[in-house]
Image: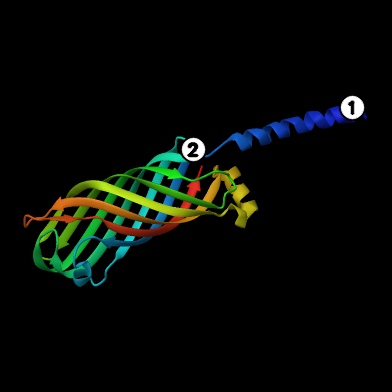
Amino acid sequence: MNKIITILLLVLLPVAAFAVDQNQERPHWSLELKGGTFTPALENFSAFYGKRSTTEYAGALAYKFTRWLELGIEGGYIKADGQGFAPLHGTMAGNVAYDLFPVNVFVLARGVFSEKQWLVPYVGGGYTRMYYKETVELQGSVKGHADGYHARAGLQFLLDGLDPDSANSFYLDEGVYHTYFFIEAGYTRAMVNTTSGGSVNLGGKSYLAGLLFEF
């Protein structure tokens, strides 16, 4: 009997130690993929582009200094096509193609208190460089960049519990600790001078949803 107990202990102790080490591990990176709507701060945007908002897509990668605090970089793409006034040219125009490429460097805090916490609030913000390009039919294009800032806040919902087997396989195969669905609202301000001598805010409000992977 003693031999059997000894053998069982020798087998189970490494397993228990591995389980403890795994529980002590934590994700060190986060990857976000998201999309939604962008409502520009430009006045009369809907009159010239046919709608008040347009589409926005973005992706972000961040390093976690702690379980709740991270520093990251985000790139996005915003596009609108319309007819009428070209705000950066400051003139009446025909067909207009308006493209924005925001690049954000941010600090973000997540309210994580448990690895099984299904609802996690977060808030963040930081520096923005907004690259822009406006192409007007028969008038060429205006392009450049503007510096500013951004802020965002949202809620993330843990998806691991919906399919624990798949979540476990995702961790074993790809090293992804958690997968979340999230929704967020953001605001960006980046002022640029126009060719007519004025200035406009290339930023606006964003309403996005996406997937967050922690690894």
Viewer-proximal residue among 153 and 83: 153
The mark closer to the camera, 1 or 2, is 2
Q: Residues within 10 Å of mark 2 (few under 14, many from 20)?
A: some
At label 1, the amino acid type is Lys
Which residue has dot 2 on it?
28
Res. 45 image quadrant: bottom left
Viewer-proximal residue among 110 and 20: 110
Q: Position of residue 33 (x, y in %)?
A: 42, 53
Q: Is 9 displayed left or right of 212 in the figure? A: right
How many marks are shown on the rendered structure?
2
Which residue has dot 1 on it?
3
Residue drawn where x is 25% and y is 64% of the image? 80
Looking at marks 1 and 2 on the same chain, the residue that comes earlier in the sequence is marked by 1
Classify 81 as above or below 178. Answer: below
Mark identifier at residue 127: none
Residue drawn where x is 83% and y is 32% of the image? 8
| CA distance for labels 1 and 2 | 43 Å
Q: Is 62 displayed left or right of 160 in the figure? A: left
| Element class at badge 2 | loop
Q: Dividing the image into 4 quarters, which one contains the N terminus? A: top right
Q: Position of residue 48 (x, y in %)?
A: 18, 70
At label 2, the amino acid type is His
Classify 110 as above or below 85. Answer: above
